[in-house]
Image: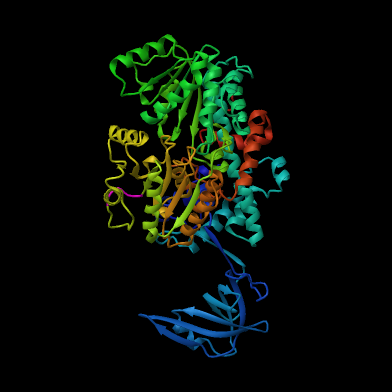
Amino acid sequence: MNLANVPVTEVKGVGEESAKQLAALGVTSIAHLLAYFPFRYEDYERKSVTEARHDARVTMEGVIQDTPSIRYYGRKKNRLTFRMLTEDVLISVTLFNRAFLKSKLTIGSAVTVTGKWDQHRLALTASELQLGLSQRDEEMSSVYYGAGKLTSKVLHKWMVNALTQFGEHIVEPLPFTLREKYRLIDKRKTIELLHVPESPEAVRQARRRYVYEEFLLFQLKMHVAKARQRQAEEGASLTIVPTATDKFLHSLSFTLTEGQQQALKDVFADLRAPYRMNRLLQGDVGSGKTVVAAACMFAVANTGNQSALMVPTEILAEQHSASLQTWFAPFGLEVVLLVGSLTAKRRRAALAKIESGEAAIVVGTHALIQETVSFHSLRFVVIDEQHRFGVAQRRLLREKGVHADMLFMTATPIPRTLAITAFGDMDVSVLAELPAGRKPIDTYWLQPDLLPRVLGFMEKALRQGEQAYVICPLIEESEQLDVQNAMDLHTQLVQHFAPNFEVGLMHGRLAAFEKEEVMDAFVKNEVQILVSTTVVEVGVNVPNATVMVIYDADRFGLSQLHQLRGRVGRGEAKSTCVLLAAPKTEVGKERMRMMTETNDGFELAEKDLAIRGPGDFFGAKQSGLPDFKLADVTHDYRTLEVARQDAAEIVSTGALYEDEAYKELLNLLTEEGVFTETKLD
């Protein structure tokens, strides 16, 4: 019996009306119902004073020692307090808005109370009270999210009924070898313990088993998808020799970091493989991703093929083009720039060189994917700041080539756990360290009332010929949020710094050409101070900018703050980032402290993930992350790593399709549409 096909109305007590209410919760079958887990558990195991942990929810039994007192405050609010003797220790018990209990709580009566324990004051703030000693059969109870008439109690009753009626039909998808290897309980017992808990440890073991299964299924999907993609997308290997970039690398004024060298090896292995490359290169701001991409382009050019680099803005394209021309000119490799603002004459010349193959490397914006662009032999495509381009745009550029390999680059440090899940169908290379000579940025957290001192510091830097960014969250004044806005701030700074320094303004409502004009003026130092919203979070290289001031910094996430900070510190001079913030929450204060303690983007990303959770890490819940029932990529990252390794082995060895022990896992994947057939060709 496949429980996914059995309607929930088959459960005793669930009628048609109840089924409609369950459907609103996404529950339509027995399988759905059994996978609707409690969001927490109430622990009613009786604790002694010595066993109870501070601030924990506990249940204690005792005898009332005095007449309860009541104190009234506010409108219809009261606090009832009495003392209770429990195992020779006198503790204080408080209940809010339970004045009606006073007449029932008599000296010498036994009571059972549940609530939050204060170890320091020997006090219990009770949420539940039962006259007499506890009569509960169970020491733990499940608490579900309900809706309307679907209370937690009703849902739990249906869970018990479903387990009684259909428990024997719960299929075990994990082979015995995996369960034995990790000491996992079987699937039926797992589901039973999650709904009818026996103890905290039993719940922990049940959750551990379920989390592993969720991660394993997801990783199997990822590895199967990757294998299918390699089959479907015909590739062709390039003859890349390990020494293909030696001349280029020796011409540089610096040596590659270990991370850059490993990334090169990764890409070269992909280029030599008979399938299309699909690799994500992630590295902190200034970690040297562009040099890695350039070395790969150089190697591809030596095979007689072309490479293309697509970036989100014209200014960035011009900067990359200039850098590559400087690097490649000594080797006779021509770099062509293709952007929308080219004159008709320059554009015709560029298109001709691209089509003839005279251009070994082409750098451009969205202009690269226009129909009029025809490559001679495009084999390697690099997408910089890949999140700024849609899937269709990336595909159009890939299709300009013949079996073109793809390298995606991002300056947003992504925790490994998220990289494994959100980019599970990609191979990932990481540049964890910064190149030698890169100066750390001094970061300070100041209260907003110290703004005059900050402006004085900025002016000193400006008089030395340096430049400054000033970032704020909003474009215009908002009645809902008391935060600095870009337009007002621009006006204030113009008044403060005129006529000695020019102040520019940039925000998301400007047209693309207006943003380009503002940034171009800043790059050329025609504007010394740039007031902006977060549109400069990822952008151009302005080595002369040494000061970054971020207003209302507590409104931003850690990764975003780090990206903004990375706009400075790109030249020879010492750079500074000032966070102006008066956070009202402990989380906000912790963010500010962490920013001042480290310049490591990956360390901050891990902490940001822990604070915000995986769904919000990429912003606005648009991460593409799977909707796990129990698994949490933040806290269960070790299990995720193990499941990833297991999935890779199961798929690569063919065990998923050939070993009878994996039959039920294969069936699950087939039911979810992962396969259109049972085996990879």
Residue shown at the point (59%, 36%) measured from the top left? 436
Q: Is residue 604 left or right of residue 51?
A: left
In this orientation, which residue lies closer to the viewer: 62 or 175? 62
Residue shown at the point (39%, 82%) measured from the top left? 73
In this orientation, which residue lies closer to the viewer: 459 or 324? 459
Where residue 605 sits in the image (x, y, percent)? 52, 46
Residue at the top extreme of this rendering: 356
Q: Say whether residue 414 is magenta.
A: no
User: Residues in magenta?
Assistant: 472-476
* Image quadrant in which you'd find residue 660: top right
Residue shown at the point (53%, 76%) measured from the top left? 125
Numbered disc total: 0
Q: Does residue 78 lie above or below 451 as drawn?
A: below
Q: Say whether residue 473 is magenta.
A: yes
The quadrant of the picture occupied by the N terminus is top right
Instruction: Examine the rendering and report whether any part of residue 616 can be seen.
Output: no
In this orientation, which residue lies closer to the viewer: 457 or 408? 457
Where residue 672 sits in the image (x, y, percent)? 52, 36
Where residue 98 sits in the image (x, y, percent)? 45, 80
Where residue 263 sits in the image (x, y, percent)? 59, 29
The quadrant of the picture occupied by the C terminus is top right
Q: Does residue 520 lie above or below 608 as drawn?
A: above
Q: Does residue 611 lie above or below 118 as drawn?
A: above
Instruction: Examine the rendering and report whether any part of residue 416 can be seen.
Output: yes
In this orientation, which residue lies closer to the viewer: 644 or 146? 644
Q: In this view, does 207 lie to the left or right of 155?
A: right
Q: Does residue 133 lie above or below 217 as drawn?
A: below
Q: Kindly report the secondary structure that dominates the magenta region of the rendered protein.
A: loop
Q: In this view, does 85 lie to the left or right of 339?
A: right
